[in-house]
Amino acid sequence: MKHIIKIMALLVALSAFWISLLQTSVLPESYTWLLPLYFIVSLGSYGLLMVGVGLMRFPTCPQEAILLQEDIVEAKGFLKGKGVDVGSD
């Protein structure tokens, strides 16, 4: 099943649930009308939390940093050989 179909099915199910809550008196009507807003705020908060967790767990790769510095030195040497001013070290 394609991902977009799953998302659309979830949206339809949530909409049906919300409409059923509006039709019945399970929750007060003032709360029921705000459920989509609560859902959007919750989704945004979850997204920010996942970005924060991803940034906290971002791996550091000291070996890759050394290789990158070596590549930079090699590129600067190549460009200086071609007559390009790459700045001072």
Image (cartoon, helix red, strand yellow):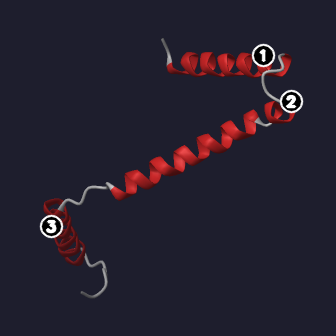
The reply to whether callout 3 and callout 1 are in contact (CB within 8 Å) is no
**Kind of residue at badge 3:** Ile
Residue 29 placed where, x, y %?
86, 30
Q: Nearer the viewer, mark 2 or mark 1?
A: 2
Q: Which residue is mark 2?
A: 29
Q: Residue furthest bottom?
A: 88
Residue 55 placed where, x, y %?
39, 57
30 or 2: which is nearer to us?
30
The reply to whether callout 2 and callout 1 are in contact (CB within 8 Å) is no
Res 66 label: 3
Residue 80 placed where, x, y %?
23, 78
Q: Nearer the viewer, mark 2 or mark 3?
A: 2
Q: Is residue 36 above or below residue 74?
A: above
The structure residue drawn at horizontal position 63% and vertical position 19%, both measured from the top left corner, is 8
The CA span between labels 2 and 3 is: 61 Å
Q: Residues within 10 Å of mark 3 (few under 14, many from 20)?
A: few
The structure residue drawn at horizontal position 86% and vertical position 35%, both measured from the top left corner, is 30
Q: Nearer the viewer, mark 3 or mark 1?
A: 1
Res 30 label: none
**Kind of residue at badge 2:** Glu
